[in-house]
Image (cartoon, rainbow, N blue to C red):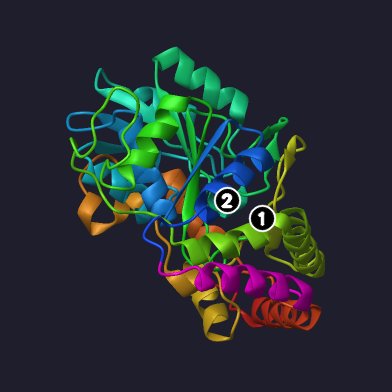
Amino acid sequence: MTPTMAADCAERVAAVLAQMPDPSGGTTVADLERELADAFGVPHAVAVSSGTAALHAALSACDIGPGDEVLVPALSVVMTVAPLVALGATPVFIDSEPTTLDLDYEDATRKVTARTRAIMPVHLWGRMTDPTMLAQFADTHGLTVIEDAAQAVGTVRSGQRAGTVGAVGCFSMKDGKILWSGEGGFLLASRREIAEHAAAYRSHWQTPPSGSAPLTRLTTNSRLAAPLAAIARSNLDQLTALVTLRQRQTRQLLAALETVPALSVLTPTADEQWNGYSPLLHLDLPHPREFAAYLACQGVPNSTGSFRLVPCDTRPMFRGLGRPCRGAAHILDHTLAVILTEHDTDAVLDHYADTIVQAAASWPRTA
């Protein structure tokens, strides 16, 4: 955040704090929702306390519950799956294509049953699934599309923004995301009834949707605090600049590594304007997970080395739900996804590149 941006953010937060305590919450959250809807070109936005809360409210608004099955990529994090399990639904993990990172629709087709109600694409690392194929698949099988676009703010594919393809698109604003507020999230919807349900769901059904009475349904408290909404509004004003910065950072790091033996850049398709959320490299090295872990120890944060990211279907709570998704496992085992923030200067990026180059040169080439 530049000094000018920081000053604007501080001013907005100070104005909200000066009005507190205010049990009504003021207008800051509503202002953010209006600005989010305008920024993404959709009729409705609902702000909540986290990306997980956005998914939870979205699934409920799409009437997902006990007995329902939801297709979800194994190439995802547990935070994607937890809300649907909390609602009593069953996750059915589907595979991904190692060469494109896109959904494996042949695998998805095999796993559709009479109980399948929805599909939840996860735009991991900001890379967006093909919206045309997704829509065709969902239409063919009569499924609702609920996008986990937590990392995909600013990504566009085939002219469609991430988070605007399905019935609902869900985003995180956790610290580290391109659009951040410390903690927080939001969902986008084209249908008023979905937005009204989500807004009621985040606040104990106190302000119910049309045709419902207050406090007639048990839900949650997942409201976004007004000071966090003020931070989000400040960053939303700079969203284009923040996305451009991340794209530039990613281009710089990948350009420094594009000729390194055993590392190959995972580039998006021609129709995708990727937000550059995380520089992606395929590792053609023995023991690639150990290589990623070594880099993490050397100060290069990355998804598998720093956070031990594994296919969601291999997590202890989900084992036994189906055959392992080997494409997702291959992707995670062989992908270096470097974690960036807007604070990473050219010097930091150069350090990351030098560290990766040196590590790759010295890594044993025999298993």
Q: Which of the numbered marks, if any, corresponds to residue 228?
A: none
The spot of residue 159 in percent (x, y) is 73, 31
Query: Residue 25 sits in which quadrant?
Result: bottom left
Residue range corresponding to the magenta coloring: 1-21
Q: How far across and how far down the image is residue 256, in percent?
A: 81, 70
Which residue corresponds to the image point at 76% horizontal and 78% vertical from the top-left?
Answer: 3
Q: Main secondary structure of the magenta part?
A: helix
Identified by mark 2, the residue type is: Leu
- In the rendered structure, the answer to whether residue 297 lies left or right of residue 324 reads right
Which element carries disc 2, helix, strand or loop? helix
SS of the residue at dot 1? helix
Q: Please give left or right for residue 239 compared with residue 288 in the image.
A: right
> Residues at badges 2 and 1 in contact (C-beta under 8 Å)?
yes
Judged by depth in the image, the label closer to the viewer, 2 or 1, is 2
User: Crowding at label 1, few (<14), some or many (≥20) Cα neighbours within 10 Å?
Assistant: many
**In front of the other: 302 or 145:** 145
Residue placed under numbered mark 2 in the picture: 32
Task: Read off the residue under disc 1.
Answer: 236
Q: Residue 326 location in percent, x, y?
A: 41, 46
Mark 2 residue crowding within 10 angstroms, few (<14) / some (14–19) / many (20+)? many
